[in-house]
Image: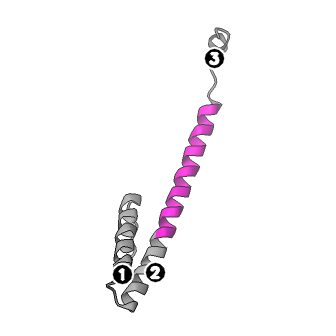
Amino acid sequence: MAKKIIKNSFEANLSRLEEISALLESNNLKLEDAISLFEEGIALSRICVNTLKDAELKVTELKKKLEDISLPDDEESED
């Protein structure tokens, strides 16, 4: 029942996680299917967490670059 994990967009992975959560909460699954879905959910969770960590790092780097930008001397003295 579990789908093969492939590299999808964050939004697609999150959507699949929500789908898995709903399926597991439905209590209409065989034990083997529930375990398989749970394993898929764990794998997708790791992918999503890593994607979020990468995005956070990118934003931090961009903010640092923005802080490193300085105004020319004549513009700074006008303040």
Q: Earlier in the sequence, mark 1 or mark 2?
A: 1
Identify residue for label 2: 39
- Marks 3, 2: nearer the viewer: 2
Residue at x 48% of width, y 75% of height:
42
Q: Residue furthest top?
A: 78
How much space separates mark 3 and mark 1, taking CA atoms? 58 Å
- Residue flagged by tag 3: what amino acid is it? Pro
Residue 56 appears anywhere in the view = yes
Q: Looking at the rendering, which quadrant does residue 12 occupy?
A: bottom left
- Closer to the camera in the image, 24 or 54: 24
Q: Which residue is mark 1?
A: 2
For the N terminus, which image quadrant?
bottom left
Separation of marks 1 and 2 at Cα, in angstroms:
8 Å
How many other residues sit within 10 Å of disc 2, few (<14), some (14-19) or many (≥20)? few
Q: Residue 63 magenta-drawn?
A: yes
- Under mark 2, the amino acid is Glu
Secondary element at image label 1: loop
Relative to 34, say whether 66 is above or below.
Answer: above
Amino acid bearing label 1: Ala
